[in-house]
Image: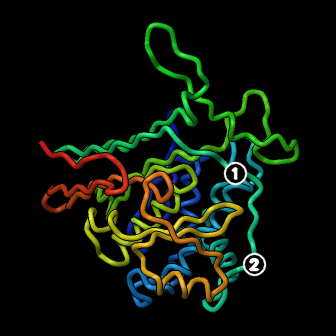
Amino acid sequence: DWVQPISTDYRGVQCWQVPPNSQGINLLMGLNLAEGFDLASMGLQSPATYHHLIECVRLALDDGLRHVTEPTHMAANTDWLLSKGRANERRAMISAKRAMLEIEPSLTTAQDDTVYITCVDGQGNACSLINSIFKGFGSGLVVPETGILLHNRGASFSLDETHVNALEPGKRPYHTLMPGMVTRNGELWLCYGVMGAMQQAQGHLQVLVNMIDFAMDPQSALDSPRFSVRLGEGVAIEDIAGDEVAGDLRGLGHPITVEPPHGVHFGGGQVIERDPDTGVLTGGSEPRLGGAAVGW
């Protein structure tokens, strides 16, 4: 389908995503929540910044998993989910001193077999592309004479008949794929994406915060330590973030596990930044997975 993208303004830049049944809306809801906190004054990679972003992600994922499915079957209105007023109400649940009690989303999704590509030309035309067959060999069905595997994202349906994402005929499931773009004053600024199932929205959020709140270049934004909110499990944080950060987050009540950096667990991103005035392109490629930034 040709669809109208959805977006939100975050600190003066417009962040664009594909609409439901994609989880792109999760990122935009997370940005709306984060906008109410002065992250820059909290400090880059500080425990306070981690804490507030983790809480924003938990609320955004909860909303997405409760409300997002095939658009014609959604009871919740997308404009309402993305409204600043709703973000203000949800943000009031976040305390600077203590992690929220367990938020238990009612659906989980698996991961694997995803590729992301970003391309920008000299005129500022851009393509942000993500594709996935979901789990190993997808459905196991191949289109004759093409070698193209058909995906099995139907696995993301819920078998709970009362759930918004319940399995029904003629309906597409909630899915995690979400290519992104960002414009500034109507001009392309970023063409980017972060792979990794439910890590995608929170990976997008962390990369954008690095670049918008902390003025990092694409490669530095991708290299920086990340966290991963794991549904029903707690929060993982990369060991490169340091023991102090992990300890302080545990002190706030977060169930923290520390893991080495890995693209499957913490996301795999690619970013192209465009200077609207000069047209200069700057690329960054994920250090946790294979990939490269190439100019020609």
Quadrant of the rendered image containing residue 188: bottom left
Q: Residue at x 82, y 40 (%)?
A: 159
The residue at which mark 2 appears reads as 101
The residue at which mark 1 appears reads as 108
Residue 21 visible in image: no
Q: Secondary structure at mark 2?
A: loop
Q: Amino acid at mark 2?
A: Leu
Left or right: 161 as drawn, with respect to 223? right
* Mark with earlier residue (2, 1): 2
Q: Residue at x 61, y 25 (%)?
A: 139
Residue 32 in the image: x percent, y percent? 55, 71
Q: Amino acid at mark 1?
A: Thr
Residue 50 visible in image: yes
Q: Secondary structure at mark 1?
A: loop
Q: Residue furthest right?
A: 162
Residue 168 in the image: x percent, y percent? 79, 32
**Residues at discs 2 and 1 in contact (Cβ within 8 Å):** no
Q: Count residues near mark 1 (Cα–Cα under 10 Å), then give few for <14, some for 14-19, many for 20+.
A: some
Left or right: 200 as drawn, with respect to 77? left
Q: Nearer the viewer, residue 290 or 177?
A: 290
- Name the mark on residue 277: none
Q: CA distance from mark 2 to mark 1?
A: 19 Å
Quadrant of the rendered image containing residue 62: bottom right
Residue 223 in the image: x percent, y percent? 32, 65
* Vertical relation: 72 (above or below) 35: above
Residue 2 in the image: x percent, y percent? 50, 34
